[in-house]
Image: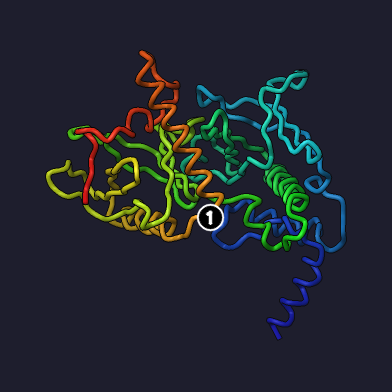
Amino acid sequence: MEQYGNELAKEHYEKHVPPYYRRPNRDDPNVLREQWIRAKYERKEFMHQVDTVYSRGYMEGFLMKKGKKDKKLERRKFVLSEVDQTIKYYVKSSSKTPKAVINIPDLNATFCDPAKIKTIKSPNALQLTYLKDGYTRSIYVYADDGKEIIDWYMAIRAAKYQHLQIAYPSCPPIELLPHLTRDFLKEGYLWKTGPKIGDSYKKRWFTLDYRKLMYLEDPLDPFPKGEIYLGEKGKQFAISSGIPAPLKQHMYGFIMKTPERTWLFSAETEEERKQWISVISSVLETPESSQDCQVYLRYSLRNSLSYTKSRSSTGSHRNSGSSFTGTLRKGKNFLSFG
């Protein structure tokens, strides 16, 4: 009887949930779960086909954005256009020229990790990521009101859904949903050492975004210091627990191999090491798609150009730094096993 009642309530309150609307589970951020409940029972958004802010194809408003070079948060104007498939943001509301134009098909939106929320000081925070000049750019924004940040999040998903429907008209809607937005598989601090024997370990913030493992000096940096592509196990990609002698030991270490380099990492606890190895292993055991292979080729080309440029220039390649610069050379300092 109880199950029957729940099904009736679901049919009543969720009759017109848009296909792109993210239905949260119990492990999702509080703001997502809270606004889902309020949307169903307070605002009754899904009982009828009502006009909502996120379903109009155009959205304009103000969000607090973290500065690129500091942690100061400033009020910025954002404009989303489904027709143009862009998000633009402006330094001032009166500005006619946007500070940045982001292509929505290349954009990902995810809710900020608790460690980032401590600095931003708002639970209603999003991390927007996209490629800029071949590197991953992150923008951190928040709204004072939970509904407002969810409206922006769903508007992004709606715009991407519209784009994918046009690009793949014969594809069932259910198959488009995983490509709207994605959560990071894991984030947290690890220690890493450089490619040379004797290099010291440095603490870095790591983010695993599917096949892209990024590390940063600070969790809220606009660019990572390095990006590591994770391919398919058996194609010179592997991960294992422990660091063999005579290599430098550090806490709970583990090794990750790629065709370009062997990486030495360490976690602060055994549990953290197990979690990182498990989640990275799951990525390596997933067969690469043709799109993944194209991404890897793009990484390889970019890294080769970065290395060539670093050898011919007296200055650094970019202010944010790229761990790939100067690490692709398989010389006497390159760590290689087996």
Residue 73 located left or right of residue 59: left
Q: What element carries label 1?
A: loop
Question: 102 or 120: nearer the eye?
Answer: 102
Q: Provide the residue designation for mark 1.
A: 289
**Residue located 44% across and 21% down the image:** 319
Looking at the image, residue 14 lies above or below residue 86: below
Residue 283 located left or right of residue 98: left
Residue that lies at the very extreme toward the left in this rendered image: 246
Could you tell me residue 173's position as x and y percent?
73, 61
Residue 234 located left or right of residue 12: left
* Quarter of the image where one finds residue 58: top right
Residue that lies at the very extreme toward the bottom in this rendered image: 1
Could you tell me residue 168's position as x and y percent?
73, 54
Looking at the image, residue 204 lies above or below residue 187: above
- Where's the N terminus, which quadrant? bottom right
Q: In this figure, what is the number of numbered marks? A: 1
**Residue located 34% across and 45% down the image:** 259
* Quarter of the image where one finds residue 133: top right
How many C-alpha atoms fall within 10 Å of the one at disc 1: few (<14), some, or many (≥20)?
A: few
Residue 45 located left or right of residue 129: right
Could you tell me residue 78's position as x and y percent?
72, 31
Question: 43 or 227: nearer the eye?
Answer: 227
Figure colour scheme: rainbow
**Residue located 52% across and 35% down the image:** 136
**Residue located 60% across and 62% down the image:** 25
**Which amino acid, mark 1?**
Ser
Looking at the image, residue 213 lies above or below residue 17: above
